[in-house]
Amino acid sequence: MSRSESSGIRSWAGRGLAGARATALSALASALLLGGCGLTAPRGNAGFADLDSLGMNDTDRVLALSIGPALLRFAARHVEDDPETRALLRSLDGVRIRIYEIEGDPARVAARMDDMSRKLAGTGWERVLLVRQAQEQAHMLVRFDDDRICGMTVLVSDGDEEAVVINLMGDIQPQQFGGVMAALDVDAAGVVDVEPRESKDRDQQS
């Protein structure tokens, strides 16, 4: 992805979602104070990804977030001025986010990320994006259930300071990923800029 493409996506996200994401984040923060089921991402969901660690000796996990359907629906109800963001949140059954600071060898972190991607690909996930530039890399994989996307996993490393692992559960298209990250105000390692260049259907990927 070129610098101009990244700037364009970031600018669009900032203009279209800035107010709505603040409302969504406020709603999520309020909901975390409430009890009940559905607060964390459901392990039994078809889109749940079995994710390994990026290595305790080389990384420090600074954020681990698991958001379930109840919290996502709650947040969507409080997004009143952006129907696109509201629809994105309602389409999700769960969100898992891990953000790491790279403190050791970036090459080992990159290798573990490659291994994680290969493991997912070997268990029914289909790769729709793979970008490698030096030690920087981005992987996007999706999982289908009856010809419908039920899960998406994105792995990103800036090759120097940060790495991010994202697992989304629900009916979500690859081109919507940046919008979800912007709505949740997640941009570590530039993850909000990860987007396939063009839409591809399942038959074209095989």
Image: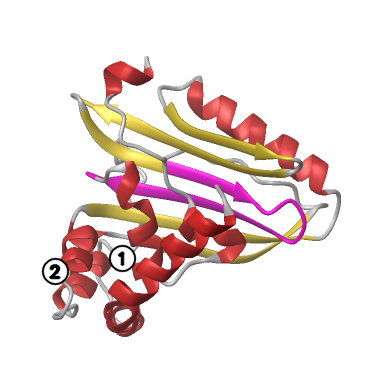
Asked if residue 12 shows in the view, the reply is yes
- Looking at the image, is mark 1 or mark 2 earlier in the sequence? 1
- Give the residue number, with chain letter if any, for mark 1: 39
* Label 1 packing within 10 angstroms: few (<14), some (14-19), many (20+): some
Q: Return the residue nearer the eye: 92 or 180.
A: 180
Task: Report x, y in % for residue 194.
Answer: 48, 50
The mark tally for this picture is: 2
Residue 158 is labelled as none
Q: Nearer the viewer, mark 1 or mark 2?
A: 2
What amino acid is found at the position of numbered circle 2 in the picture?
Pro
What amino acid is found at the position of numbered circle 1 in the picture?
Leu
In terms of secondary structure, what is the magenta stretch mainly? strand
Which residue is drawn at the image coordinates 77% and 56% (left, top)?
160
Side of 31 relative to 98 (left or right): left
- Give the residue number, with chain letter if any, for mark 2: 83
Which quadrant is home to the C terminus? top left
